[in-house]
Image (spheres, rainbow, N blue to C red):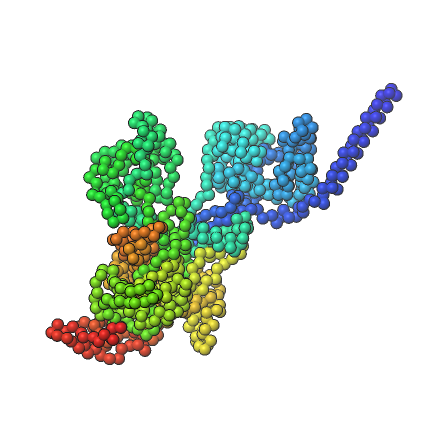
Amino acid sequence: MKRSAKLLKFFLWSGFASFSGLLLVAASAFLYLSPSLPAVDSLRDTNLQTPLRIYSKDELLIAEFGEKRRTPVHFDDTPEKMVKAFMAAEDDRFYYHPGVDIVGLLRAAVQLVSTGRIQSGGSTITMQVAKNFFLSHERVFSRKFNEILLALQIEQELTKNEIFELYLNKIYLGNRAYGVEAAAQVYYGKSIDELSLAQQAMIAGLPKAPSRYNPINDPDRALIRRNWILGRMQELGYIRDDEYQEAVNEPTTASYHGTPIELQAPYIAEMVRQEMVERFGPETYTEGFRVFTTVDSTLQKAANESVANGLFAYTEKHGYKGPIRNLNEENEISDEDESFAVWQKALKKARSAGPLKPAVVTLVEDQSATILMKQSKVTTLDWDNIEWAKKYINVNAFGHNPKTATDVLKVGDLIWVRQMEDGRFRLAEEPEAQSSLISMNPESGAILALLGGFNFYDSMYNRSTQAVRQAGSSFKPFVYASALDDGLTAASIINDAPVVFDDEGLEGTWRPNNDNMKFNGPMRLREGLYRSRNLISIRILREVGISKAVSFMARLGLPAEAITQNLSLALGNVAMTPLEMTTGYATIANGGYKVSPYLINRVEVLDETVFKSSPATVCRECLNKKLNEDTENSEKLTTEAITTPDATDLPEEVIVAETVTPAELVMDPRVNYIINDIMRDVIWKGTGKRARALERHDIGGKTGTTNDSKDVWFIGFNPKVLTSVWVGMDNNTTLGRWEYGGNTALPIWLSYMKVALDGMPEQRLPQPDGIETVKIDPETGQLANQGNPNAIFELFRKENTPKAVSQPKTNGEDGTPAFKPEDLF
């Protein structure tokens, strides 16, 4: 008996000593580790890493940038059964323990002693929050002890629902998805409130091993895990028997869903990304910035379609270069079954290129061909979608029109096709030519649509902002505007005749010519612009003086370093980007005000606006108000922000602002009004006649074609929408001898502007004070005689209105006016 008492006493003291030892070890560990523990309070202010998202003006998603896909959700917005699914999978006693589950910890301790490593951590949801926010994922005892200490602290500071919300938003769930909302989008393309019970359980099974139980990578293993969780939910009373049975019978439906891009505008997305990095640095990708741009989704879609169709039209006009390759010849096969396997393998590897889809020709008949596309889709190419494909010889030559489909296609050809509006497919080729389209509100510089090439994913080179190209005749309006500013008039008579220059700046003798090698003799300045006569432009620039003209152009915002300092400037021998050209044209389109292009309207983080653009904007009311208040100090208009007197006069983008920064007036409004009027004649009388299809009288513009047709342009506008189109080759070779701004660039512009101006009433700039309209003799530019049947109306600045009445002298019986050479400069 005494022996038993002693044994009992020994065990009691041993137990007490062991407990004391463990307590001492725990206390020592706490004292050692606790100074390095982070403050739990920081969890309340946790900024979850959320990607940069870029939107159009009407809030369609353009792009997402960032390593982690995450869309934070509130606990109250999370479906109850999804919460229960995670509890069943990870911690069913979450709402009852103090942050640490003793049973789970004992299990982990046994594993550590028996195997030398921790196999299942025994971590509660609170401990996982501690690990995910504060600790590494290294499986060592010190980290586990830190987890315990932090979990206990977290439970003291936060409510259970706050802890669960942090968990649901932080947990990694595979495929770059962090948090349950991102996982729902990645695996099912839905929001969490749209998921079925089975889908919720599938996501709840991912935290244990996001790769191993991934329903995309290993659907069989993921299904086992899902059904185990559903069984636990049934066992714990979270779901009814019938709910369980329905859920386990549901097949696996997960598939990868990329970010649901709602508007294709990758060139814009990249421009915005770069600007955001400049403004906010590396945090751009993690702080959850939501960038709202000035881009109109309807117009951007129109731009995408117009450029693609324009480049396809150019490509088809020059002939078919042939298939990508012939798979049958390449693989030396003839057996039909073997061919089909080769075709499917090739299609699986083949990429798409914008609207172009790969296809294999499987059968060629007299007037049609059968093609195989991805996912074993079979369709037919009808003759009207093949017959364009005459053989390409070179950029200036092509073969005879094909008579049958066999003249164009062979079985085994890997080809490009594109889908037409009627749903049928058309034989196509990837365009070699490239294009830029920029559409802008000229009153504020807001970019409405922009495209920098045919396919961003083949070439990220943005031709709108990076391609420095020759402007050609599209630059002439700036030359003519400088002449009007210098005192010439739209009625000034200039001689369209040959001229020879010996100019060191031009490296010897220069004999400029018109594009058609013809000369028309004396003509008015107005006619010289709308007919785009080179010799007229040269004589005008020589009359104004190069330095004076260059100074005028630089004032408008054109880059001074790009402006040629010799007479070739008159022909557009300047190299600048399409965006720089468009910005210069904005000054013409808006009445003479200098604006800068911009894309970012505002930036938000968690519904807080952290940046809002304040562009210099045309505000005629602001100008008039300031001039009336203090004429002598009117120069301050260029720097001061003035309270908007009448928001209805402002562009849509800035109406929401209480103040507006008035744009600087850099061109005499009267000069601007006259050059606008002349540029409308480009449409109705000159090289831009294709634009008449719009049946509008408020459109002005100018075509441009450089030597050897290496660059072709059309830039056109009304007071609210300005759009430029450039077409050319990246390697700076010719587009072909019959390609001009009027037949290559203008059709793209026209297709886009039909959408941009749809429903917009015609409007013109208000006529400024100091403009007079008088009848002149078109042959002399002077006031017309009474009864002159050829008299026309012309616009003048008041001080430049002609005073003399036309008294033409004649040479001979034909009545041809006899001008003195000095009158024609």
Q: Position of residue 444 (x, y in %)?
A: 42, 62
Residue drawn at x 47%, y 72% as measured from the top left: 636
Q: Quadrant of residue 677?
A: bottom left
Q: Which residue is nearer to you in this view: 8 or 726?
A: 726
Q: Quadrant of residue 764?
A: bottom left
In the image, taking residue 746 as reference, residue 37 lies left or right, namely right
Q: Residue furthest top?
A: 1
Q: Is residue 14 visible?
A: yes
Q: Position of residue 70 (x, y in %)?
A: 53, 44
Q: Position of residue 360 (x, y in %)?
A: 32, 35
Q: Which residue is nearer to you in this view: 8 or 139?
A: 139
Give the quarter of the figure containing the N terminus: top right
Give above or below for 288 relative to 14: below
Residue drawn at x 68%, y 35% as measured from the top left: 141
Residue drawn at x 28%, y 74% as measured from the top left: 773
Give above or below for 522 relative to 156: below
Give the quarter of the figure containing the C terminus: bottom left
Give above or below for 362 relative to 560: above
**Numbered disc total:** 0
